[in-house]
Amino acid sequence: MNVVVFGGSGYLGSHVADALTDAGHQVSLFDVTPSPYRRPTQKMIVADVLDPVAVDRALEAAQCAYNFAGIADLDAAAERPIDTVKQNVLGNAILLEAAVQRQLQRYVYASTVYVYSRAGGFYRCSKQSAELYIEEYARRYGLGYTILRYGTVYGPRADGRNSVYRYLHQALTTGRIVCQGTGEEMREYVHVKDAACLSVQALADEFANTHCLITGPHRMKFAELLEMIREILDNRVEIHFQPVSDDDVHYRLTPYSFTPKVAQKLVGTSYLDLGQGLLQCLADMYEVVGGRERAAGLEAK
């Protein structure tokens, strides 16, 4: 199909765009900044999702659209509630309107496991609102959709907004990991390339008009992830937990609160091992920070 990936220059969007290309689809990237990861066969459209004319023009020949555009960081959303509404709710509505007008076969939306929760702050509110708009557009106009609810994604191309990236970067550059929590928090970490492949598989007919969970294959304590990082770095990393602030937007044991809207979990046939994934991230990061001499926190020990 001809697919447009909105937010295609970003972390998760760029990986899904690559997975779509690998699957044989014709892919266009739509973002406010050019993608540093764009492949030669991928078209780049530099524009804003808040521009209805640009969005409509981008979907002129498309059969499918993925929406990764908007504010994806919980802390940023907590600090910028109005921008979060504009980007995540209004931007989504503009895409939906164009998708209906262009008679798209499928509208795929990047949501979050936080829609099940009372945690997540304004980010969670925006995702819940966006999902409701999608369901109403489907009811009124027959728009085919798939909502993907992502868990904790990690892997290459991440930056400081990604929690696993922050812990790895702290460990590598300072020899210390300072984080909020107790270590008992439960997470299901999923490598970004696994998440991207599952996101493409969601185009199958069986996932039309459904909500799908994309998380890791195993639940683990937050402290276990940090211990893995410490062992990978020869036990030369100190781990310091700090009390959780009163306005913390992250969940502790589970993102789930009671809700009548359930989703099926989208499971792949294979996953990248978490330890291997962390090693890959550290190797990439080591090249960026410039070698051992800049990993001062470790070299001093």
Image: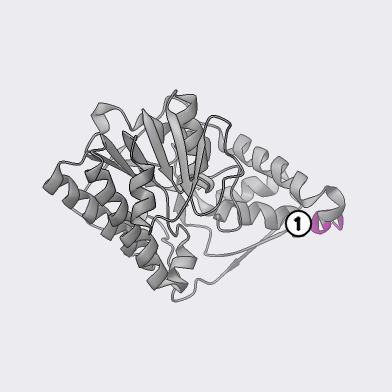
Q: Residue at x 30, y 55 (%)?
A: 94
The answer to whether 245 appears left or right of 265 in the picture is right
Q: Report whether residue 234 is seen.
A: no
Magenta residues, start to end: 296-301
Place of residue 51 in the rendered image (x, y in percent of width and height, measured from the top left):
38, 57
Q: Hey, which quadrant is residue 259 in on the image?
A: bottom left
Q: Residue at x 14, y 45 (%)?
A: 141
In the rendered image, which quarter contains the C terminus?
bottom right
The answer to whether 229 appears left or right of 295 in the picture is left
Place of residue 206 in the rendered image (x, y in percent of width and height, measured from the top left):
24, 28
- Residue at which label 1 appears: 173
Element type where label 1 sits in the image: helix
Q: Residue at x 74, y 52 (%)?
A: 172
Furthest toward the bottom, the residue is 246
Residue 297 lies in magenta, yes or no?
yes
Please name whichever residue, 218 or 37, is drawn nearer the observer in this view of the structure: 37
Q: Is residue 28 above or below residue 71?
A: above
Q: Report whether residue 134 is seen.
A: yes
Q: Residues within 10 Å of mark 1 (few under 14, many from 20)?
A: many
Q: Hey, which quadrant is residue 155 in on the image?
A: top right
> Is the magenta region chiefly helix, strand or loop?
helix
Residue 154 lies in magenta, yes or no?
no
Place of residue 208 in the rendered image (x, y in percent of width and height, measured from the top left):
24, 34
Q: Is residue 278 above or below residue 159?
A: above
Q: Is residue 78 above or below residue 297?
A: below
Please name whichever residue, 282 or 45, is drawn nearer the observer in this view of the structure: 45
In the rendered image, which quarter contains the N terminus?
top left
Q: Residue at x 50, y 54 (%)?
A: 32
The answer to whether 268 appears left or right of 229 in the picture is left
